[in-house]
Amino acid sequence: MLLTNQEIDWMVEILSVWKRYELFGHIYEWLETRYELSQDYTSGLQQDTSCSRIIRVVGAEIRAVLEIYERLGIEMLTAFN
């Protein structure tokens, strides 16, 4: 079964968005590691630790979006085969 141009465009777009989110995920993992290391040098007050929590939450949301795009890509590949 041959794919239409529109189907190919959808797959390319899904891969493109997935790659962008994957890059964001790597950036947030790096930030999370840096903030966790810096916790040894803070007072432990809420204002010192809130940024680390925010980074962890955003990182988790990015990973969730990546999983959705991965499932969508797999579903599209199996639908077109």
Image: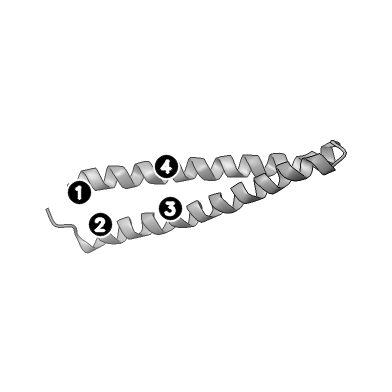
Q: Mark 1 — residue? A: 80
Query: Which residue is denoted by mark 3 in the rendering?
Result: 18
SS for tag 3? Answer: helix
Binning the other alpha carbons within 10 Å of mark 2 as few (below 14), some (14 to 19) or many (20 upward) gives few
Q: Amino acid at mark 2?
A: Glu
Left or right of 54 on screen, residue 61: left
Residue that appears at 38% across and 45% down: 70
Badge 4 local density, few (<14 within 10 Å), some, or many (20+)? few
Residue nearer the viewer, 28 or 34: 34
Could you tell me the amino acid type at mark 1? Answer: Phe
Q: In screen coordinates, is 20 left or right of 78?
A: right
Q: CA distance from mark 4 to mark 2?
A: 18 Å
Classify 73 as above or below 10. above
- Of circles 4 and 2, the one toward us is 4
Which colouring convention does the figure follow?
A: one colour
Secondary structure of residue under mark 4: helix
Pointers 1 and 4 in contact (CB under 8 A)? no
Q: Which residue is mark 2?
A: 7
Mark 3 touches mark 2? (CB < 8 Å): no
Amino acid type, callout 4: Ile
Residues at marks 3 and 4, CA–CA distance in whole angstroms:
9 Å
